[in-house]
Image (cartoon, rainbow, N blue to C red):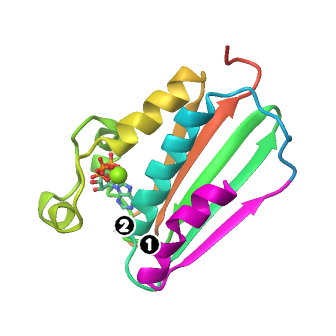
Amino acid sequence: LESICTSFRELSDDKHQTLRLDHEALPSRLSVDAALLEQAIKNLLDNAIKYTPEGGTVAVEARVVERTLTIDVSDDGPGIPLEHQQRIFERFYRVDSARSRAVGGTGLGLAIVKHAAALHGGQVVLESRPGAGTRFSLRIPLEEWR
Ligand code: ATP
Ligand code: MG
């Protein structure tokens, strides 16, 4: 998590954003597909920075609660309208084509996040409201993955 955040520091600094990482009480070893999980976290972080305006705040919080690894990536950006919240996990789906085109992307990032969660028997929980920011919560039950 620290190296992922370090690798995004340049992007967030360029936008004068605050990038916070908070990971308390994580086990030193986890049985997960580390490469896939890393890609998923990077996709969430990339979105948070990309879609949050200059000067905003992006936070990564990781913890294990009741044998579930929870990684939250939140931002105080524009939020995602309710009518798009189901569809953004589909491949190639982007919310506002004009605005999204301006930032660039393929629409694959969240499909990969969903796949990564599913492969671990977990889920991605989205909480977002227009004007009130966005939080994606990646939840991986530690005993179920094999
Ligand atoms: P790619 O990730 O392939 O480069 P992308 O970012 O457009 O392209 P996704 O990561 O799948 O694709 O995201 C889908 C859409 O969901 C985005 O185009 C954007 O409209 C919306 N979105 C995702 N994350 C956020 C966020 N944190 N705040 C606001 N909108 C978001
Ligand atoms: Mg993306």
Q: Residue at x 42, y 82 (%)?
A: 14
Whole-percent x, y for residue 72 in the image: 61, 53
Dot 2: element:
helix
Q: Which mark is residue 28?
A: none
Q: Which residue is drawn at 51% across and 24% down?
A: 118
Q: Please state if 102 lies on the left or on the right of 26 as rendered.
A: left
Asked if the residue at label 1 sits under 8 Å from ligand 2, the reply is no
Q: In this view, does 104 lie above or below 89?
A: below
Whole-percent x, y for residue 42 in the image: 49, 51
Kind of residue at badge 2: Lys
Dot 1: element:
helix
Q: In this view, does 69 lie above or below 104?
A: above
> Disc 2 designates what residue?
50
Q: Counting other residues with Cα less than 10 Å from the Cα at mark 1, is it few (<14), some (14-19), or many (20 or more)?
A: some
Quarter of the image with the C terminus is: top right
Magenta stretch: residue 61 in it? no
Asked if the residue at label 2 sits under 8 Å from ligand 1, the reply is yes
Q: Please state if 63 lies on the left or on the right of 130 as rendered.
A: right
Residue 127 makes an appearance in the image: no
Q: In this view, does 29 lie above or below 61?
A: above
Kind of residue at badge 1: Leu
The picture quadrant where one finds residue 101 is bottom left
Q: Earlier in the sequence, mark 1 or mark 2?
A: 1
Q: Which residue is drawn at 81% across and 31% down?
A: 67
Magenta stretch: residue 10 in it? yes
> Disc 1 designates what residue?
11
- CA distance for labels 1 and 2: 9 Å
Whole-percent x, y for residue 87 in the image: 29, 39
Where does the magenta region start and end? 1-24
Q: How many marks?
A: 2
The picture quadrant where one finds residue 112 is top left
